[in-house]
Image (cartoon, rainbow, N blue to C red):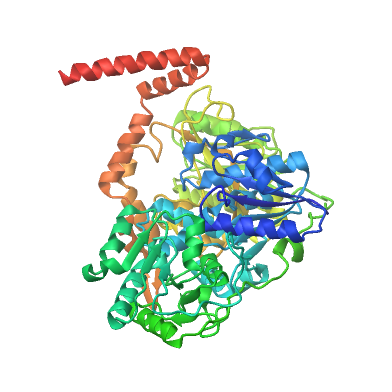
Amino acid sequence: MLGLTVFVTSELFPFTQGGIGRVLTNMLDAHRSTSTEAHGTAVVFLGEPIDASRFAERFPGVLLVDASPATYAERDDGFRYPPAGQYTTHPLHVDSVRAMQALKRLEREHGPLRYVEFPDWGAVAFASVQEKRLGLAFEGATMAVRLHTSGSVLNAMESNPVDRSSLALYDLERKALSDCDVVIGQVSATARAMQTFFDFADDEWLPRLVIDAPPVVLDHGAPASSSIVPGNDTPIAFSSKIQRIKRPDVFVRGCSDFLRKHPEYRGIVHVLAMAPDPVYREEIRRLVPADLAHRFSFQFDADSEARHELIRRSVCVFPNTFESFCLAAYEASLSGALCIVNRSNPAFAEATPWTDDENCVKFDGTPADLSRALTKAFAAGAAVAVARSPAHARPWESIALHEAEPATAVTALPLVSVLVPHHNLGAYLEASVTSALASDHANLQVIVVDDASTDAESVEVVERLAASADPRIRVVRSRQNLGLAATRNLALAHARGMYALTLDADDLIDPRFVFVAVKALERHPEVSFVVPQTAYFDDAPDADPARSPWPQCMTFVGEARASGLLQNRFSTATIMGRIEAFRGLVYDESLSAYEDWDLYMRAVMARRRFIVTNAVHFYYRRRAGSMIHSEAALRRINSYYHEIVRRKEIRIGQNTLPMYIVEGAADSDALALLRAQLAAYENSAVVKAALRARELASRLPKPVQLGFRRVAAFVMKARAGHRAK
């Protein structure tokens, strides 16, 4: 099957900076010069739009697809997505959805995709691999993720403070790696390091792993046949980015020690690097001893030709603690530099092209040993060989590509049991049941378990449902109040389906979700659950969340291994799953709340697999007195959270600790109160009226909207002046 080979990126040399973009450009150039295949190549570019004519001149024959932020669509291909600013996991989550939408447009307009490669950084592949696993797009396409260096790995290596969104990014990046077809490591040792970091077993990782070192191309000059022979005037250079993971501090300290020990050396030490963080840049400057300041040169904005000219005649040091490949080191070696590299960096490990005393000099990553390595390199007075990236067929040329799954005859639709626990929500129960019965999946039953409701309306509605002529509806009554967890378990006990959908009595499910989820579970027997993305809607008699604006959305990861320990980023209480998975886990009846969060946490701890929809398929009703939004309930959040973590354990090294130690990072009472106040604010009549007014105003002609804004600005300025008096 022919089709497009596609690369998804937010970096592309020479249009942007960044190592990912440079690697991609090298691969595109090499592919164009050697490929004889009939299928085409496309680049889906997520950054701000690139000039199409410049792109066509630089990459002739390559199709450019604009996936810039302005292309994000809230409605696309019949589905509806959260507004771009309402993703509650991580800001980069929306970028992955934007990439997925661009790929679907590409597929619709140009035919099937053959191979799609994403960078690991930022979980760009997350939405696309979920869409494929749902069976909604990309049939037959091989979805590959290349290990450049993920944002989560950088967070572990850098001095970056992390927050809850950082934990969600870890989960998103891991999920993208977990569900893609091919993982591309650029060096075996770095691929192993990332496997360990993201906690993948060998049988999950190795069958999908392909090692593919990218080509190395020089912008200036011809490739050298060997390195320079260093002398007492040879420059020493640091050409990496001024970034903690690159260890410029080790470079400055090691070189300072070398200068003191070797007064015969007359050369200059050059820091020839970008410095995106001015604070850290000055911190590195201050490491230079005052008496050696004249021996150091800092150049943060040198052009590429000047960089090449200096590097090619230098001893070039790479003290980096972690790299997926370190393209800059290969470029330096190919230019003629004598390279000194950190052997503790997996990119320079023993099983890589870098061999000590053959094509480089290695040190152990400390300033003292860098000083020793510099002494060794200068004392040897000899050239070394060039370190070369191995030549081989690229993954899209060599791996067995995935074929579309053959259509199978459907003998019978699997039965789905929709489980609706109910207690005193009669005003909403029938709407919830109706939304389930409207499903595109024909074979389902709705089991309503009434947990001893007491109000007259609820009793009447339950009676009416029990008397319904619809054979798909079954009502189970509890004689005494059991609580939500026990009611959910009672519903599970009565379920006859192969799959179960949990649905609370005041919420609504999109009619397409059951069909989509069943298809995914049928295709992937290793998966236990399918999670719908969620939109809130305000409680109103005429509420129609499928068509009306959403005041708020909630996005989920499914396998929230990290973020799910502090916030429920697994799913709402509504989820589709295999009945045996639910029954194997069961809801913990000792819990007063968060029984769903607890079940998902235990499921992920047991390495159960999830798939997540990208479109919104579940509608959560915001009621003024609901469990989540009332001030009294929010004051109890800390105790509820303690209940779900207190009997679990975590391992740190050889230590097993109670999981409640993570409560120190959970919300304080003050934050809970603030949430309660915010919820009250969001639900106030004044704010609802204001939001409604804004919605109506947005439908006015643009000139009229502009006039209103000018009037509003004038009024606000006048009020500010009045307050100043």
Q: Is 274 left, or right, of 204 in this rendering?
A: left
Q: Nearer the viewer, residue 692 or 544?
A: 692
Q: Is residue 560 visible?
A: no
- Furthest toward the bottom, the residue is 380
649 in relation to 554, above or below: below
Q: Nearer the viewer, residue 505 or 155?
A: 155
Tell me the residue at 54%/40% (across/down).
48
Q: Nearer the viewer, residue 668 or 511?
A: 668
Could you say where residue 452 lies in the image, as x and y percent from the top left? 47, 41
Could you say where residue 446 lies in the image, as x and y percent from the top left? 63, 41
Residue 272 falls in which quadrant of the image? bottom left
The quadrant in which the C terminus is found is top left
User: How many badges with numbers are in the image?
Assistant: 0
Could you say where residue 169 lies in the image, as x and y percent from the top left? 48, 54
379 in relation to 510, above or below: below
419 in relation to 398, above or below: above
The quadrant in which the N terminus is found is bottom right
- Furthest toward the left, the residue is 725
Tell me the residue at 64%/46% (across/down).
44
Could you say where residue 398 lies in the image, as x and y percent from the top left? 75, 66
Q: Is 244 left, or right, of 133 in this rendering?
A: left
Tell me the residue at 70%/64% (across/down).
395
Q: Is residue 529 visible?
A: yes
